């Protein structure tokens, strides 16, 4: 493990960053670019909520509203949430967590960032050309008949997908072949396990999305009509293929977030996770079963009852793995003798809250009889924002605060950190709990207008979106300021036993694992 | 291969695994298209039979033979590289690349023939035939693109193997290039029956 700072030494200046093959610098390049996308996607979110402040038209025409929610989804999902944790955090932490000198393929790693950048530029070009208006799912026949800039957006997402594949290959090969001597699979830190499981999805599912988007571009551009019923195509086939990628993609966003929580909690509680192996098995299990659950997105699109039943049951299997993780996290907290109240812990608790309620509403939605009522309403929007967005955002900030001293060598002001975490909890619930209620009341998604009696709840959600904006801006400002002016941190301010925080590790240290805390209360059985 | 240093062995293992993972990713790429083919075929078998009857069977079949021969040469190159025989390795790789070019030539001839006969989706084709020809162009086009990349990969591997000291210890590079070529070949072994052989009308 290298102990030199990522900011110092070889390759100062812009070129030292643009041509770096240092996994830490590539991670930070990804962090900078994905966080920029979070800002752009967030502006669209604020516009959507502002339009919905009152019934009738406020500041967006119905057409502009379609483009706003489409670009919000496209930018947030493909340019922020899918890449941010694997490519930014994974790049930085996976080699450090397994004692590898770097990723297995450092040049490929840098290439993946440029591929990401090229894709992002294409998507933003599409945005400058007016954006797409099909929704982020590009359903047929919307994509066959739209006059908006669907082609650059779809091709951009296609290109970004390949950067995901390259990152996935790198993480898998690194974890397999570059673990330090003494570090067996069952001593691999849980964040790295999560990144590994995520990479399986990145590598296996992304190519399917790539093919679909190529066909979408051909459909729209060349009028080939593979998904267009007017030309003999099959729009339902599009949905199958799209969700074959996009359902596992949910786990691309959630699995690394779970990994963050799994590693933040033992450090905060100064004790091993209450059941390490369960989290490992559940991570890989979610990655694999996630491939078989896509049909639950299509219950109302024309599906045999029997198929719906099978897809529903398979979807609920994911919930079993997820619940096992939640119980393990809670167990880790339950017997902690000390619990350091720091921002990462509050973010991790926020994650658990959002994940439990997002997940349980997901189990409900995986039941066809209930889904028929909620489908295409704001209930679904609230559900997937809870689980994907809330999950990713809270884990993203937990990770930023938790590993901030590792990356910058400095501390952040804890009060501002706690305030940021509190704002996220309040803002998120304020924004999205009303959407559950509105959806249950029948308010459809993707509509720029609504009946007057729905205004109070919509207003609460809009105010919530402002709190949420603050909850993003405050921590970013805090961390940027602290990176330059924060108090110096020692090498391991949280007294973590995880490998990335320690130096001069021997094979025997690695063999004792990353959760080698000795403050375990007597009489408590440690599993795994 | 017994004298490898630890670092070289680690690099070899990473490279072999990385290529295997990449190829499984590529399999999903073509796998998706193949799944689409069969999903759409279920509802319009006669149209798909008719489409296949318009593809040039002799091109598809000789293309298969050419690709199989190229794969044999690529496999031999991997073996020879392991024994450190640089010139023979390069010869086999260049032979495989040349056969790849022959395949592309055959395919270009066939594409030209299709365009002349209007077998291009989006135009005046009947609706039932649109799906077959869309999939034909997208899938074989994507495959041809892979062949083109493969030719470049094999050619640069040939140049690399005559330049490299201690080729025997770095044979995994050649083996990786050969594996990529085998995938391109294996995909074609599925496309050949899909687009040429399943034309109906007989046992």
Image (cartoon, coloured by chain):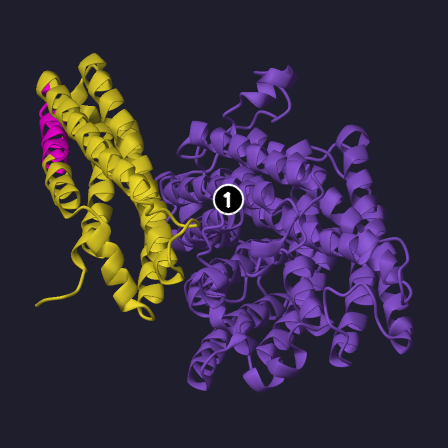
Chain colours: A purple, B yellow
Residue A292, by quadrant, is bottom left
| Among the 4 quarters of the image, the one containing residue A58 | bottom right
* Total labels drawn: 1
Above or below, A111 relative to B139: above
Residue B13: tell me if it is visible: no
Q: In front: B73, or A446?
A: A446
* Residue A291 drawn at (x, y percent): 43, 64
- Residues A9 and B106: in front is B106
Q: Residue at x 44, y 27 (%)?
A: A107
In the image, B87 versus A95, the foreground residue is: B87
B183 with respect to B122 (left or right): left
Magenta residues span: B70-85
Chain for numbered disc 1:
A
**Left or right of A309, for residue A393:** right
Q: Residue at x 69, y 63 (%)?
A: A385
Question: In front: A327, or B118?
Answer: B118
Q: Residues within 10 Å of mark 1 (few under 14, many from 20)?
A: many
Say if A332 sits above or below A184 in the image. Answer: below
The image position of residue B109, as x and y in percent, is 23, 34
Q: Secondary structure at mark 1?
A: helix
Q: Main secondary structure of the magenta part?
A: helix
* Membership of B113 in magenta stretch: no
Q: According to the image, label 1 marks what residue?
A: A158
Query: Is B103 placed left or right of A420 in the picture?
Result: left
Q: Is residue A361 visible?
A: yes
- In the rendered image, residue A88, in percent from the top left (x then y), is placed at 58, 40
The residue at 30%/34% (across/down) is: B10
Residue A490 pos. (x, y %)? 68, 35
């Amino acid at each position: 493990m290298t102990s030199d700072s990522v900011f110092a030494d070889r390759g100062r200046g812009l070129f030292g960053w643009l041509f770096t093959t240092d996994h830490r610098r590539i991670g930070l390049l990804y962090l900078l670019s994905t966080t920029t996308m979070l800002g752009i996607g967030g502006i669209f979110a604020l516009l959507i909520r502002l339009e919905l402040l009152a019934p009738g038209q406020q500041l967006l025409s119905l057409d502009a509203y379609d483009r706003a929610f489409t670009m919000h989804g496209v930018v947030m999902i493909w340019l922020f949430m899918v890449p941010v944790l694997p490519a930014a955090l994974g790049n930085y932490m996976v080699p450090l967590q397994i004692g590898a000198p770097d990723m297995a393929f450092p040049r490929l790693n840098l290439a993946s960032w440029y591929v990401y950048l090229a894709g992002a530029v294409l998507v933003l070009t599409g945005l400058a050309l007016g954006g797409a208006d099909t929704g982020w799912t590009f359903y047929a026949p919307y994509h066959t008949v739209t006059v908006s800039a669907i082609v650059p957006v779809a091709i951009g997402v296609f290109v970004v997908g390949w950067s995901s594949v390259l990152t996935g290959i790198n993480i898998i090969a690194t974890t397999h072949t570059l673990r330090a001597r003494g570090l067996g699979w069952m001593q691999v830190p849980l964040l790295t396990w999560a990144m590994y499981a995520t990479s399986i999805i990145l590598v296996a599912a992304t190519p399917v999305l790539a093919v679909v988007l190529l066909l979408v571009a051909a459909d729209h551009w060349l009028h080939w009509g593979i998904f267009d019923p007017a030309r003999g195509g099959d729009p339902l086939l599009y949905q199958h293929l799209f969700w074959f990628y996009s359902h596992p993609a949910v786990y691309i966003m959630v699995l690394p977030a779970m990994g963050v929580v799994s590693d933040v909690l033992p450090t905060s509680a100064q004790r091993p996770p209450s059941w390490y192996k369960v989290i490992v098995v559940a991570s890989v299990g979610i990655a694999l079963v996630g491939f078989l659950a896509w049909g639950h997105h299509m219950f109302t699109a024309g599906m045999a009852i029997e198929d719906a039943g099978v897809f529903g049951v398979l979807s609920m299997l994911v919930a079993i793995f997820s619940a096992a993780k939640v119980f393990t996290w809670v167990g880790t907290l339950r017997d902690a003798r000390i619990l350091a109240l720091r921002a990462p812990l509050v973010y991790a608790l926020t994650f658990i809250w959002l994940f439990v309620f997002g997940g349980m509403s997901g189990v409900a939605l995986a039941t066809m009889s209930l889904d028929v009522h909620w489908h295409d309403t704001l209930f679904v929007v609230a559900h997937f924002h809870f689980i994907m967005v809330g999950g990713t955002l809270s884990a993203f900030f937990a990770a930023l605060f938790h590993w901030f001293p590792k990356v910058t060598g400095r501390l952040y002001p804890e009060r501002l950190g706690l305030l940021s975490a509190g704002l996220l909890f309040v803002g998120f619930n304020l924004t999205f709990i009303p959407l559950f209620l509105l959806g249950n009341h029948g308010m459809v998604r993707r509509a720029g207008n609504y009946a007057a009696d729905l205004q109070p709840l919509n207003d609460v959600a809009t105010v919530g979106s402002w709190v949420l904006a603050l909850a993003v801006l405050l921590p970013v400002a805090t961390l940027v300021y602290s990176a330059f002016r924060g108090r110096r941190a020692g090498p391991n301010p949280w007294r973590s036993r995880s490998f990335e925080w320690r130096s001069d590790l021997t094979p025997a240290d690695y063999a004792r694992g990353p959760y080698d805390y000795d403050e375990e209360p007597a009489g408590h059985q440690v599993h795994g | 291969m017994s004298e490898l240093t630890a670092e070289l062995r680690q690099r070899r293992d990473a490279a072999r695994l990385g290529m295997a993972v990449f190829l499984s990713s590529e399999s999903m790429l073509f796998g998706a298209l193949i799944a689409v083919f069969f999903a759409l075929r279920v509802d319009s078998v006669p149209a798909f039979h008719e489409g296949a009857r318009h593809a040039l069977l002799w091109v598809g079949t000789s293309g298969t033979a050419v690709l199989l021969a190229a794969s044999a040469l690529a496999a031999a190159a991997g073996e020879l590289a392991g024994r450190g025989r640089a010139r023979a390795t390069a010869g086999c790789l260049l032979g495989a690349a040349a056969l790849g070019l022959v395949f592309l030539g055959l395919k270009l001839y066939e594409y030209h023939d299709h365009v002349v006969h209007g077998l291009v989706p989006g135009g005046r084709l009947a609706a039932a035939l649109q799906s077959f020809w869309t999939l034909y162009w997208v899938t074989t086009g994507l495959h041809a693109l892979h062949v083109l990349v493969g030719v470049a990969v094999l050619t640069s591997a040939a140049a690399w193997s005559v330049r490299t000291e201690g080729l025997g210890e770095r044979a995994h590079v050649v083996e990786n290039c050969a594996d990529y070529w085998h995938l391109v070949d294996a995909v074609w072994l599925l496309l050949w029956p899909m687009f040429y052989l399943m034309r109906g009308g007989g046992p």
